[in-house]
Amino acid sequence: MGRISLVIPVFNEADNILLLIQQVIQAFKWQNFDYEIIVVDDGSGDDTIRRVKNLNDPRVRLIELKRNYGQCLAIKAGIDYSTGDYIATIDGDLQNDPEDLIEMLHILQNEQFDVVTGIRKKRKDQVIFRKIPSFIANSLIRWITGTSIIDNGCAIKLFKSHIIKDIPLYGELHRFIVILAIYDGAKVKQIEVKHYPRMNGVSKYGLSRTFKVLSDVILLQFYRKYAQTPSHFYIKIGSLLCFSGAIILSYLLAIKILGYDIWGIPLIFLGVLLLLAGLQVITSGIVLDYIMRTYFESQNKKPYGIKKGDI
């Protein structure tokens, strides 16, 4: 049936973590799955670590990060140290139901998908500060990335191990982990999952995170199009700047030939500035291309992926 690793990043979730672990154990009690629960403590200042250690359950592994690195790197740490054929993620706030993982597992085992991600049904969050910003952000993400993921913020997801372990995570990119998997050729299925209101602890999300997410989605789109050839982006911008500067200087040269005095006109400085800035941007793009070439060659990185089992 395969082994599943459940990654739970936590930060000050002492009142929730034991209840969540009990829910996971109960959900898998009658299932023929071998599983491990990986709790990644992201620098908690409460009693979270002690409570997990006191469980003394061989199915529960605790990873203690040296400080608070953020949810994205906590998830990445759990993924790196997981041993399962399937890797799931879920938040430690009890707002998701581990029982939904059972249906996700059956989908990955019986259907031709690599990832199953949740859509929070009847989401139990504040309308103004959570649901409306989330709706706007998800709509923009779909438009910018050209994907159809309805709920990027849903924490409960399940991946085949070889898919998720190759995905780079930093910043707030854990929100786009499914999109990154799609970019890498993964087939994704979305299903509705249960969602509950937070009962204990304080939410770590707010409007400020929405702006971080939107900045990261712009970075994500750049990564998708120009990760291997950044010069294509910089040369486009640089050429536009150079062309604008050349048009301005050509115009000034023409009126100079017609006998007009152009010395001291601010437009001269603008034309020269645009021309020099364009050349600088183009040069930066060429340098970045060499850096990317060095990166792939020095670390023996392959700029392509091969489906598991094809060789």
Image (cartoon, rainbow, N blue to C red):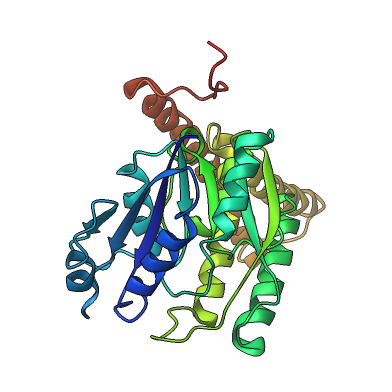
Nearer the observer, 52 or 25:
25
Tell me where residue 62 sits by quadrant.
bottom left
Residue at horizontal 45%, vertical 82%? 203
- In the rendered structure, the answer to whether residue 3 lies left or right of residue 11 reads right
Q: Which percent across, then down, holds residue 162?
A: 47, 33
Q: Which percent across, then down, holds residue 115?
A: 60, 43
Nearer the observer, 210 or 191:
191
Residue at the farthest front position: 30
Q: Which percent across, then down, holds residue 214?
A: 59, 66
- In the rendered structure, the answer to whether residue 83 lies left or right of residue 293 reads left
Nearer the observer, 169 or 110:
110
Mark yes or no: residue 171 visible: yes
- In the rendered structure, the answer to whether residue 199 lies left or right of residue 48 reads right
Mark yes or no: residue 179 visible: no
- In the rendered structure, the answer to whether residue 5 lies left or right of residue 211 reads left
Nearer the observer, 169 or 86:
86
Residue at the farthest top position: 311
Residue at horizontal 57%, vertical 52%? 102
> Is 105 rendered above or below residue 71?
above
> Is 119 rendered above or below residue 222?
below
Q: Which percent across, then down, holds residue 211?
A: 55, 73
Tell me where residue 100 sits by quadrant.
bottom right
